[in-house]
Amino acid sequence: MDEETDLLNQKFEPMLEQIKVLFFEFGIKNLNMDDISHKLGISKKTLYRFVKSKEDLIARIFEYEQKRWVEVVRSISAQEVNAIEKLFKVSLMVYEEMKRFNPIILFELRKYYEPLFLEYQEKKMAHVALSMRLNLDNGTKEGLYRSDLNADAIIAIYMNYLVEIHNSDYCKGADLSFDELFKIMFEQHIRAISTAAGVAYFEARKNEITELLNKSRN
């Protein structure tokens, strides 16, 4: 990447954050490049200095999101906390991101930009799976997770829960919010994979973890 391209990317990243907000507010299909440039307060010619087309813009947003995700997960991994704390923080990130993808946005991405969306999802889930595998290894070494776990099965089941938890069918006939479902799902997962020491640690931190979830919601 040459110096000029790198400089353009640095200038464009704050705009990508603004464009994300616009898409979540108005939908992707409802905004054309004229609308986007107008709302950014720049000319369409300037916008096209950064991207070639709307499809290219979507691809750049996915690249930006993937980069941001890797940086945040790396930051969490470097924290001097145990595996249970790290798992909660990463799980909460995935959960919060899935909440942002409302049904309209998901429909538009799958209908109009499916190859880009599937590639982004595949990369994201592969990184989540790698993070979870490292977390399982670390938790086992710390004596918090059981040593007899089938890592592949645990990762597959937990990731499926994180993605599918926003399916409205989960709440039908039950007076439960998605946040309550997340708390229950996380607790059941920890209890299933933990040693007695891990369960004891979770019990001691359970109320504080609930407070962290409440803060993220506000």
Image (tube, rainbow, N blue to C red):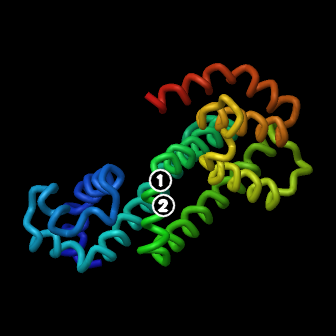
Residue furthest out toward the front = 173
Q: Is residue 83 left or right of residue 112?
A: right
Q: Nearer the viewer, residue 17 or 106?
A: 106
Residue denoted by label 2: 106
Q: Position of residue 8 (x, y in %)?
A: 19, 68
Secondary element at image label 1: loop
Vertically, is 205 above or below 132?
above
Q: Which mark is residue 185?
A: none
The amino acid on which the numbered mark 1 sits, given as a three-letter code, is: Phe
Q: Would residue 28 be seen by someone viewing this image from the given angle? A: yes
Which residue occupies 30% across, 54% down?
A: 26
Mark 2, secondary structure of its residue: helix
Q: Mark number for residue 101?
A: 1
| Residue found 65% across the figure and 60% down from its top | 130
Q: Is residue 215 above or below residue 42?
A: above
Horizontal and vertical percent for residue 51? 24, 75
Amino acid identity at mark 2: Leu
